[in-house]
Image (cartoon, helix red, strand yellow):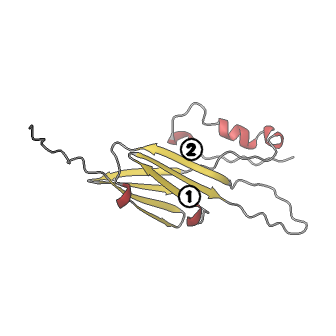
């Protein structure tokens, strides 16, 4: 039986992780048939930038309908979840040789350095990339109290 192994020469350089190859062990090893075809959770990669009074978040969520994406903001905590579906139409006499596209629930949660004004936040999804524009809350709401 021939087994295809996915290899990315840049992946090992892109992060320092002592368990980086553990994912590949479960994806391509003898344990896969014992797992019943279950796949690991889909990855959701993000970039967060800050520009003056806003944060900009870009999340890669390919193959998802925008109706299946849920974003919630609670002060400085941002959570993104998406349902990734895979069509399973199979033609007569067809067999799968390699299946690497993942499906299921993708979830990512992170904390920003300061609170976000959720009522002014904006979300846009195009070409597999979710873009969030998150304005910071104004912290300049101090006032003097009159002592009576």
Query: Percent x, y for residue 56?
Result: 38, 55
Q: Quadrant of residue 54?
A: bottom left
Query: Percent x, y for residue 99?
Result: 75, 55
Q: How many marks?
A: 2
Question: Which quarter of the rendering shows the C terminus?
Answer: top left
The dot on residue 61 is 1
Residue plotted at (50% across, 45% down): 109
Q: Residue furthest top?
A: 18
- Decide which of 133, 33 is in the foreground and name it: 133
Comparing labels 2 and 1, the label whose residue is closer to the camera: 1
Which residue carries the number 2 mark?
11
Callout 1: SS:
loop
Image vertical order of residue 109 relative to residue 132, above or below: above
Q: Quadrant of residue 69?
A: bottom right
Q: Give the class, few, some or many, for how many residues have Cα within 10 Å of label 1's Cα (few <14, many ≥20).
A: many
Residue plotted at (66% across, 35% down): 22
Q: Residue furthest front?
A: 148
Q: Residue furthest right?
A: 93
Callout 2: SS:
helix
The dot on residue 72 is none
- Decide which of 61, 119 is in the foreground and name it: 119
Residue plotted at (86% across, 60% down): 95
Query: Percent x, y for residue 30?
Result: 81, 38
- Left of 78 or right of it: where is 87? right
- Left of 141 or right of it: where is 102? right
**Of the residues under marks 2 and 1, which one precedes in the sequence?**
2
Instruction: Work out how far the residue at label 2 is from the one at label 1, CA to CA, in angstroms.
Output: 19 Å
């Amino acid at each position: 039986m021939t087994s295809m192994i996915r290899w990315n020469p840049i992946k090992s350089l892109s992060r320092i992780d002592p368990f980086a190859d553990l994912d590949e062990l479960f994806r391509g090893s003898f344990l896969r048939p014992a797992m019943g075809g279950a796949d690991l959770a889909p990855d959701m990669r993000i970039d967060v930038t800050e520009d003056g009074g806003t944060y900009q978040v870009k999340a890669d969520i390919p193959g998802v309908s925008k109706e299946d994406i849920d974003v919630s903001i609670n002060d400085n905590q941002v959570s993104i979840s998406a349902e990734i579906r895979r069509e399973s139409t199979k033609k007569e006499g067809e067999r799968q040789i390699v299946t690497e596209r993942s499906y299921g629930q993708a979830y990512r949660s992170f904390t920003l350095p300061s609170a976000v004004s959720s009522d002014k936040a904006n979300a846009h999804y195009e070409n597999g990339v979710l873009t969030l524009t998150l304005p910071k809350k104004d912290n300049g709401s101090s006032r003097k109290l009159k002592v009576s």
